[in-house]
Structures are given as C-alpha cells and as structure tokens.
Amino acid sequence: MKMNQRVMTLDEFTIQELRNYPGATGQLSGLLRDIGLAAKRVNVEVNKAGIADILGEAGKTNVQGESVKKLDEFANDQLISSLQTSIYCCGVASEENEEFISFDDEFSRNSKYVVLMDPLDGSGNIDVNVSIGTIFSVYRRLTPNGSSCELEDFLQPGSQQIAAGYIIYGSSTMLVYATRRSVQGFTLDPSIGEFCLSHPNMKVPDESDIFSINVGYYHLYEKKVQKAIDHFMAKDATEKVYRHRFIGCMVSEIHRTLVQGGIFMYPAFGKYAQGRLRLCYECNPMSFLMEKAGGLAFSDGNQRLLDIKPTELHQRIPIFIGSKKLIEEVLPIIR
Ligand code: AHG
Ligand code: MN
Ligand code: MN
Ligand code: MN
C-alpha cells in the first residue's frame, strides 16, 4: 500500500454504510464497534499467552460438559461487559453461560438486538499457539422494545440473522462480518489499534481442492459420511487430488474456506450423536456468512442449515459447509 493511501477503519466503514442507507439508526454499527473493542481486548491477552497466567484450565466444566480454559472465561467476560456497557444490545446468550442474560437497564431494554456468541472458539489450540477465534450472531428481538428479552428472542432460525461474523486471532487478527448485503473483512493494524478494511466484499471460490473433517473419527461416522470422505481421497494418480486440512478450530476452518474455498464437515457420530458444533453459537453465524459470500451450508442431507428452528440454546447439529460446487458434490452422497 502506498504511504499516502487511506485505509478505512471499521468505524469509518460502518458510518459510510449508514450514509448509504438513510433509514438506518446506527444501532448495528454501534454493536459491531462494541464487539470490535472487546475483540481487541481479547487479542491483547491472546498475544500474551505464555507470559501472562492465562494458559491451561480454569478448573471448571461448562454446560456443554467441556473443561473451561482461562481464556474462554476472559473472552466471555470482556464481550458481555462490552455489550452491557453500551446501549445497542438488550441481551446475550453464550456458549459459556447456561442461560441467556437480559440487560435490564433503561437503555439496553430499549435496544432491538440480541447477540449469541462463542467467545473463544478452538480453545484447545491456546496452549499450542495455534489460531483461535470468536464467533457472534445478531438477531432483532421478537419481544417488544422496553421489555426484558426472552428465550424466544434467541431461538430464531439462522435465516433471521441481521449480522454474523467472527474474529480470528491468527498470524494477524481479523474481524470478518456479514450483513444481509455483503461480507467484509478487516485486519487489525497493531500500530493504530484499529480494524482496517483489507478484504472488501468477500466471496468464497465456487471450486477448490481442500476438504476438512476430523478423519480420526472415520470408523465412527455413518456409512454415508465415510463415502463422502472417500469421495475426496484419490484412488490413483489419475484422479483429482484434494488437500486435507484440519485445524481444530471452526473459525480457522471457515476463514480458510472463505479465502481459498473448500468444504468443512462436522458430522454426528458416537458420543456426539446430534453433532459436535453448536447451532446457535457456531453453525448459524458461519452458515449465514458462508451463504452471503456465495457458498452453501447444510445440516444432515438436504436440510438448509439456516432453516432450522433451534429448540434450545446449546443445541448441537451436524454441518456441511463451504464452496458451492463441493457441497453440491457431497449432498447426493449424504442424502
Ligand atoms: P470450543 O473451543 O468453542 O468449545 O469449540 C471447539 C470446536 C470447534 O471449533 C472445532 O472445530 C472442534 O471443536 C474440534 O473438535 P474435535 O477436535 O473433537 O474434532
Ligand atoms: Mn468450549
Ligand atoms: Mn467453538
Ligand atoms: Mn468456545
């Protein structure tokens, strides 16, 4: 980039968007700013991992039955307090909290948005210095402004999302979010401490040679899933060769898919009979984002993931997500 070239910050970008849509109130922009601020605070701690005492377990188990890492808790606290302090969000549901939280002060109660989130995704990667992330999802509340929010506000099908996105704490830190209109990617410029527009109007390639699934569970998957994996394994030198990737962090898998294309699959098996990944905190936001970028996301077989109406906050679901062409190849196999 040339020295005198101005890059737009996240705040500048959302304000410019407001100018283009005269009816908009700026509440969503405010919300994104809050999430961006919390993400910067989390980012600082992530970068200190190894020095500060944030590695390892917090000594607790969450409602999902998983051990909670110290950074999971830190990220959860930062995001909740950031959203609570501001006036753009009336309540939040998190992977780390059994129940949703309703912000009952006068301003928050009058806000029209609720947020669902996975504050720290891929937390098993923290101790080994591999990418981790944060996932968020925004809905317009169903209950009237001025009242406390209710469970029904959080249990809407993914197709109703107003915005969704993630922060990836990788070799650089990025915030990527989708609205009904587009998908935009911002990279944190550490010298000014701002997310700057680096990936405008992101589109997922239709085609790719990357597939991603935990093949360690191969023999535990249903036959149809084994067939889907076999589809991507070259039988001889004449067949198309796919590259296999598995990072163990959904945010990283989705980010790679968005940039390079590919397919990411997390089917049901054995102890995860309903699937491993969470519908409200992980699969819905990522499916919204993928579709807005031109990709596809399905649950079992022929069910568009975004059409599913959640029945509980911590519900899990199988997912097949990614480039259009690869999903279309896999659908007849897993149907
Ligand atoms: P979280 O750290 O938020 O609990 O989620 C981790 C998830 C997901 O990001 C990743 O794809 C998956 O766990 C990996 O699980 P396996 O190693 O069992 O495949
Ligand atoms: Mn977890
Ligand atoms: Mn997660
Ligand atoms: Mn998590």
Image (cartoon, rainbow, N blue to C red):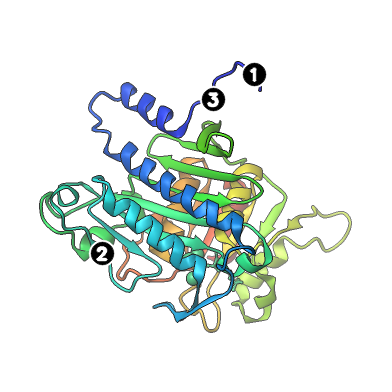
Q: Residue furthest right?
A: 237
Give me the residue at 79% from left, 52% from top.
240
Q: Which residue is mark 1?
A: 3
Give me the residue at 53% from left, 74% from top.
268
Cα distance between the residues tagged 2 and 3 = 37 Å
Mark 2 falls on what kind of element?
strand
Mark 2 / mark 3, whichever is N-terminal = 3
Along the horizontal axis of the image, is 234 left or right of 6? right
Q: Mark 2 Cα within 10 Å, few/some/many (few <14, many 20+)? A: many
Q: Which mark is residue 7?
A: 3
Is label 1's Cβ within 8 Å of ligand 1? Answer: no
Closest to the camera, between mark 1 and mark 3, is: 1
Q: Which mark is residue 110?
A: none
**Quadrant of the image for the N terminus?**
top right
Res 80 seen here: yes
Q: Position of residue 41 (x, y in %)?
A: 47, 51
**Placement of 250 over or under 165, stated as above or below:** below
Give me the residue at 22% from left, 53% from top.
90
Mark 3 falls on what kind of element?
loop
Closest to the camera, between mark 1 and mark 2, is: 1
Cα distance between the residues tagged 1 and 2 = 45 Å
Cα distance between the residues tagged 1 and 3 = 10 Å
**Placement of 303 over or under 227, stated as above or below:** above
Identified by mark 1, the residue type is Met
Q: Are marks 1 and 3 in contact (CB under 8 Å)?
A: no
Nearer the observer, 334 or 102:
102
**Placement of 21 over or under 310, stated as above or below:** above
Q: Which residue is mark 2?
A: 101
Identified by mark 3, the residue type is Val
Give me the residue at 66% from left, 48% from top.
171
Q: Are marks 1 and 2 in contact (CB under 8 Å)?
A: no
